[in-house]
Amino acid sequence: MSTVLVLNGPNLGRLGSREPDVYGSANLADLQELLVASAREGVSIDLRQTDDEAELIHWLYEAVDERMPVILNPAAFTHYSYALRDAAALVTKAGLMLIEVHISNPHARETFRHTSVVSAIATGVIAGLGFDSYRLALDFVTAP
Ligand code: DQA
């Protein structure tokens, strides 16, 4: 059984009630259900959310140590956290996949969201497709 870490940054714990016009009305439990239902046989989903930058960084260390691919929605950390970027770089430098995902399309929103400090070290980026951003990332990182 291989495990994919699905890591979510600040305020994503409020999905469902947070700006439904932008993020939709489904919550993280719905995302978990979607990913489990669409995972390939033998793939388990470890979905986590934190508002704490240090915790997110430590989960990326865990991905390196346990050799797990990562689907990462860094949320607002996307736009300014060099500490998170450096930890995410450890994952891809270790030869593991890390896909940066976003529910909304940050490029179609406020200017400060147009910059991602994570994208340059990510394996790839999927944005603007709602929860399908995660589903497509899962399909990619677990492709045979
Ligand atoms: C987000 C986009 C970010 O700009 C924002 O800060 C989030 C969510 C997304 O999934 O669309 O919290 O990462």
Image: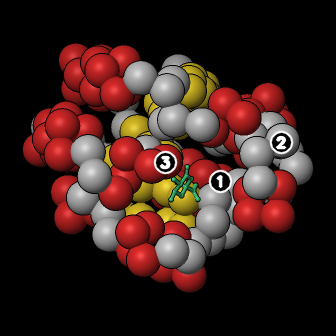
Tell me the quarter of the picture where residue 69 sits. top left
Which residue shows up at 41% across the image and 23% down it? 52
Instruction: Give the image quadrant in which the ligand numbered 1 is located.
Output: bottom right
| Residue 54 higher or lower than 73, as above or below | above
Classed neighbour count for the residue bearing mark 3: other residues with Cα under 10 Å, few (<14), some (14–19), many (≥20)? many
Tell me the quarter of the picture where residue 55 sits. top left
Q: Which residue is mark 2?
A: 16
Relative depth, front residue between 113 and 102: 113
Residue 5, x across and y down, in percent: 47, 30
Residue 40, x across and y down, in percent: 65, 41
Residue 14, x across and y down, in percent: 72, 35
Say whether mark 3 is within 8 Å of ligand 1: yes
Q: Which residue is mark 3?
A: 75
Could you tell whether 114 is left or right of 117 in the image? right
Farthest residue, direction right: 25
Tell me the quarter of the picture where residue 105 sits. bottom right
Q: Which residue is mark 1?
A: 135
Question: From mark 3 to mark 2, how far is it between C-alphas?
Answer: 15 Å
Q: Earlier in the sequence, mark 3 or mark 2?
A: 2
Question: From mark 3 to mark 1, how far is it between C-alphas?
Answer: 17 Å
